[in-house]
Image: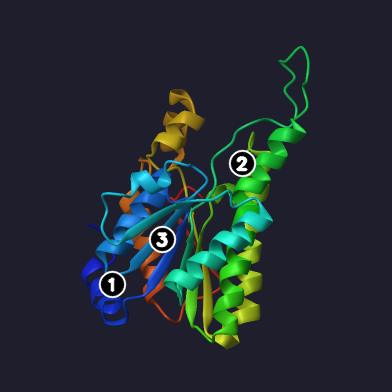
């Protein structure tokens, strides 16, 4: 399925039977990551604000789907405390929560409200950055308290370097990268690793919803490998981050050479 040996991952996970939480589990990437980790031998808890998440995974043995608004501190703490108490100890957290948002800082073509909406800014930052922080602080505090060695993988984006027309999204993903490095330095001595996966443009429904066909074709033209990334490309990077115990504090770009 993937460039990185899924059979190697299966052997490692089968030995340990780890429990993994995937935030944003109802999204295109989150759903695929949840299935992949289950197929590799993990027990998986997929969490998403979408209230249909439990039903979405009802027919998937080995995966428990739960709904929670991870931008709400109190709801997040309560839900993750319940998850830890029921399924813990948890040694894997994959933060796939978030969504792409495009809006210019100033839209000079508009007759009114030319400036970037603050409401949109806040929602994008909360969904892509605050949710990652809240999920991580709640799970990692419990990892540290119980001396549970583990790994946190944050799904970032090459937009962290700054994409024109994506102020809020770029800022949020840059924050994800910075938190990943800071946490790796802080918690490495406790055996907790942190890795960010930064895809370019991935062939998913959310990408096509966020970008026009013309814009998508232009990004493909600018990419040396001349294609969008695939979900399998991202899965192989996630498995690498989870199974290589000497990788931490890194941002792994999966972008077909877009950032060269």
Residue 105 vs residue 124, the one in the foreground: 124
Q: Position of residue 17 (x, y in %)?
A: 31, 76
Point out the tag, 3 or 1, that comes first from the N-terminus: 1
Give yes or no for contact between labels 2 and 1 (Cβ–Cβ under 8 Å): no
CA gap, disc 2 and disc 3: 32 Å
Query: Which residue, given by chain and number where applicable, does mark 3 sit on?
Result: 45
Query: Which residue, given by chain and number where applicable, does mark 1 sit on?
Result: 9
CA gap, disc 2 and disc 1: 34 Å
CA gap, disc 3 and disc 1: 18 Å
Q: Which mark is residue 163?
A: 2
Element type at mark 3: strand
Residue for point 61% across, 80% down? 187
Residue 67 vs residue 120, the one in the foreground: 67
Element type at mark 1: helix
Crowding around mark 3 (Cα neighbors within 10 Å: few <14, some 14 to 19, many 20+) is many
Residue for point 62% across, 62% down? 77
């Amino acid at each position: 399925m993937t460039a990185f040996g899924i059979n190697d991952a299966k052997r490692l996970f089968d030995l340990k039977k780890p429990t993994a939480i995937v935030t944003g589990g109802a999204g295109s990437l989150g759903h695929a990551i949840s299935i992949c980790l289950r197929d590799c031998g993990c027990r998986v808890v997929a969490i998403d604000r979408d209230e249909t998440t439990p039903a979405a995974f009802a027919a998937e043995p080995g995966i428990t789907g739960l709904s929670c608004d991870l931008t709400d501190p109190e709801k997040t703490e309560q839900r993750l405390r319940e998850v830890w108490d029921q399924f813990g100890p948890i040694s894997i957290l994959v933060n796939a929560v978030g969504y792409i948002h495009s809006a210019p800082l100033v839209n000079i073509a508009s007759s009114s409200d030319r400036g970037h909406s603050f409401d949109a800014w806040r929602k994008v930052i909360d969904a892509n950055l605050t949710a990652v922080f809240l999920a991580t602080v709640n799970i990692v505090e419990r990892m540290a308290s119980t001396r549970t060695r583990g790994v946190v993988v944050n799904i970032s984006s090459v937009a962290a370097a700054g994409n024109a027309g994506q102020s809020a999204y770029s800022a949020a993903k840059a924050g994800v990268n910075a938190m990943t490095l800071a946490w790796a330095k802080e918690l490495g001595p406790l055996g907790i690793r942190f890795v960010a996966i930064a895809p370019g443009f991935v062939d998913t429904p959310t990408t096509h919803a966020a970008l026009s066909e013309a814009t998508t074709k232009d990004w493909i033209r600018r990419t040396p490998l001349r294609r969008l990334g695939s979900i399998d490309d991202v899965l192989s990077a996630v498995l690498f981050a989870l199974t290589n115990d000497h990788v931490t504090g890194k941002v792994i770009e999966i972008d077909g050479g877009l950032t060269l």
